[in-house]
Amino acid sequence: MDYAVHILTMIAITGIAAVSLNLLIGETGLVSVAQAAFAGIGAYGMTLLMLHAGIPFLAAALFSALIAGAIALIIGAIFLSLREVYYVFGTVGLNMIVWAILLNWDSLTRGPLGIPGITRPEVLGISFADNTAFLILCAVVLLAVFAAHYAIMKSNFGRVLHAVREDEEAIAVLGYKTEVYKIVIFVISAALVAFSGSLYATYLSYINPSAFTVNDSIFILAIVILGGLGSAYGAIVGTCMLVGAFEALRFIGFPASIAGDMRQVFYGLILILFMLYLPRGLFGKFRI
Amino acid sequence: MTALVTRKLEKRFLGVHAVDHVDIACKDGSITALVGPNGSGKTTLINTITGILPMDGGEIRVGERTLTRVRPTDAAGLGIARTFQNTRLIGQMSVLDNILLALTERSVWRALFERQGQSHLDAAEAVLRRVGLSEKRHANAEELSYGQRKLLEIARALSMRSRIYFFDEPFAGLFPEMRKVVAEILRELRAGGAAVVLVEHDMDLIRDLADFCYVLDSGKVIAEGTPEQVLKEPHVIEAYLGK
């Protein structure tokens, strides 16, 4: 039972990151490989605020989401001139820089040692120390993010994002400052994924930089692509599939010495098969 | 009153003048035709005026404003709406949503917290009825025929309620009945006081619709005047027919 709760909790936390990334890549066509960086900013921001400033979880998580959003605002403005693959590599570079800062700023982050002792949250007087209660909290946040995704895409703003994905220049001729729309959705996505980072930190009660690498961003990207671009529902199903399938591999009985590598092989194989036979993913509206 | 003027407008590609010191003027309440053989620079001229291509020299005057640089996003603010020679609709979006893009709020913050109002929907329905696409309102733009996509793009331009309209070969691929509708739309815009710029190859349509005509060849204006005047000129006939 505890194991199932753990898997579902990881699915909910990763799902928040995936749905927030879908706003960028799926709906707007901005392929970002920096979600783990913003999750890291959220996780470390929340942790430092909780441990050193004594700020309660919710306020700390919201404030660190704001910090992530502010950083995304600056980065988004810098990346405005980048197109397609250059934008992708820009975000890769961002993730590498954030990871390097987390790893090397020992006095603040304790570097590779990470930060232990992060307590489970208490929100509005309700304790989420219990694993099942914490799963409910994560599920509620995931639902809220899902609802926010829906509301954004049903708004006039969402319509413009769709248009930006297909033909940014044509929509600019209609008078839309498309660069502002792209920055705003980058900021929203960063803030949402930062919140998932806060949940991750408080769930495991320990964080270190190895959880926020480019590989982790690629993992979230793969989830969104496999679930299907432009589908928040697909992002959640993709999360269940990849997180769940990885866990299922534990029961196949690979020798311990190769189990980790086999998971990577399996992960790669899924990606290749999907790209070959289902390039739109499970519920995708669009191709990359 | 003159709505738009270009002065010595230039656009070069690797040293080749695609638009070569072009001077044109478009008046309110008139239809100005741009004619010329393929590759003469008509579309490049429109793309330069609307900011799709950055200008390399000269200036554009729109109303009281004189510009030496126009970005695509500036066009709408200058009161310019346009269609494209090869339609540039949002293919994976419904016909209705393509129109709503032209009707709804441009401001990011209002767009984020608002959905289209009933007035937007009514306006979209009206313009779709005008071009005969009401029944296709929920179809994706990419599912339309070539002619229907042309009509949808015209409808989108109309929804901008602009002062100046550029129509790049709007009659191409249309059935005769729809050509009549588009011609009627252009006349209505003129009657409403708009400055209409029309790129077209069909000389009968030019004679029928245009009040003034510029003939382009190799990026230069080689003749200007009423259609009847310029289309008789020997060097215009030579540029067109290669005689």
Image (cartoon, coloured by chain):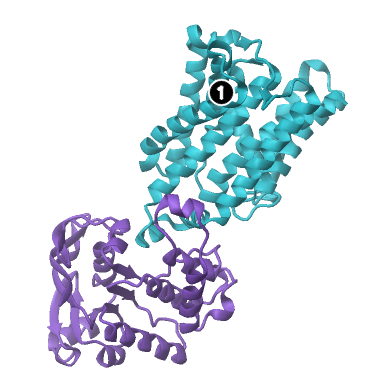
Count residues near mark 1 (Cα–Cα under 10 Å), then give few for <14, some for 14-19, many for 20+. Answer: many
Image height check: is B17 above or below A185? Answer: below
Task: Count how many numbered circles sit on residues in the image.
Answer: 1
Q: Quadrant of the N terminus of chain A?
A: top right
In front of the other: A170 or A71: A71
Residue A152 visible in the displayed image: yes
Label the cyan chain with its letter: A
Q: Residue at x 52, y 64 (%)?
A: B91
In front of the other: A138 or A22: A138
Label the purple chain with its letter: B
A247 relative to B196 in the view: left or right: right
Q: Position of residue B164 (x, y in %)?
A: 27, 73
Q: Which residue is mark 1?
A: A60
Q: Position of residue A5 (x, y in %)?
A: 81, 28
**Three-letter residue code for mark 1:** Ala
Q: Position of residue A92 (x, y in %)?
A: 49, 31
Q: Position of residue B211 (x, y in %)?
A: 21, 87
Q: Residue at x 37, y 62 (%)?
A: A174
Image height check: is A125 above or below B32? Answer: above
In front of the other: B50 or A6: A6
B179 relative to A286 in the view: left or right: left
Image height check: is A29 above or below B38? Answer: above
Q: The numbered mark 1 sits on a residue in which chain? A: A
Q: Quadrant of residue B206?
A: bottom left
Q: Residue at x 53, y 34 (%)?
A: A191
Q: Residue furthest front?
A: A125
A126 relative to B137 in the view: left or right: right
Q: Residue at x 59, y 71 (%)?
A: B139
